Amino acid sequence: MYFAALLARTEDGWEASDMELDDVESLTDLTDLARDAAVDEDTVVAFIEQEGGWFGVVRVDGEDDPRIFVSQASLAARSSYGSMLTDELLGSDADDDNELDELDLDGTEDGEEEVAASYDEDEDDGAPGTGADRAPAGPLGDPDLLADLGVSRRQLLALEVDALGELAEALGATDVLEAVR
């Protein structure tokens, strides 16, 4: 079972809305939903959680490319909505021009300790793999996507149980998120 919600930043704080995933088939669909929920093209954060197994965060700022973080990529890659996120982050052999090239796929920056596994190209047998085959066992994407909103890389990477509740608390949006939960 999935829980999905959108948090749109406004002058007065955050507005939450339940996100219906039935019509979401791609990251583009999800991004369009987020942009539709935006107030004056301000930040919108989409949360997707699958029964405590994994969570994903997609941040959309105006017309900028979305920024993505997935807590447990290998688990997410085995689910329909999680695979949508992990496939986008990992790219595909058919689409080497990934729109999200600026993302730091292994979750590290130069000089930082590695915090997430990445796909080992040496193990590639030449056959196209699925996202589940290539997804690391840990986090994937941009762990700094909420840093300017009060959730540090370290905090995001440490989240496990009730991650969305803790994220909402850190953003000051607990009440509005609980209202749609």
Image (cartoon, rainbow, N blue to C red):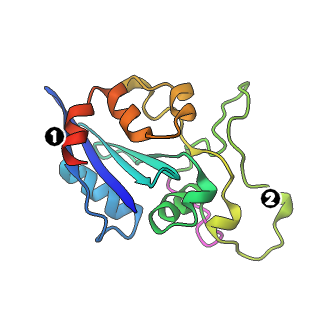
Toward which corner of the image does residue 154 lie, by quadrant? top right
Q: Magenta-highlighted stretch: main secondary structure?
A: loop
Residue named by callout 1:
39
Residue 145 vs residue 93, the one in the foreground: 145
Toward which corner of the image does residue 165 lie, by quadrant? top left
For marks 2 and 1, give the CA distance.
42 Å
Marks 1 and 2: in contact by CB < 8 Å?
no
* Type of the residue with mark 2: Glu
> Residue 42 location in percent, x, y?
23, 36
Q: In this view, does 16 lie above or below 131?
A: above
Q: Viewed as shown, does residue 63 lie left or right of 118?
A: left
Q: In this view, does 39 lie above or below 101?
A: above
- Mark sitting on residue 121: 2
Q: Is residue 93 magenta?
A: yes
Is any part of residue 41 visible from this angle? no
**Disc on the earlier residue, 2 or 1:** 1
Q: Viewed as shown, does residue 47 lie left or right of 145?
A: left
Image quarter (top left, top right, bottom left or bottom right) of the N terminus? bottom left
Classed neighbour count for the residue bearing mark 1: other residues with Cα under 10 Å, few (<14), some (14–19), many (≥20) = some
**Residue drawn 24% across and 40% down?**
178
> Residue 159 location in percent, x, y?
52, 35
Secondary structure type for disc 1: loop
Q: Is residue 130 above or below residue 4?
A: below
Residue 118 vs residue 161, the one in the foreground: 161
Residue 99 vs residue 178, the one in the foreground: 178
**Residue drawn 27% across and 32% down?**
174
Q: Viewed as shown, does residue 75 lie left or right of 114?
A: left
* Type of the residue with mark 1: Val
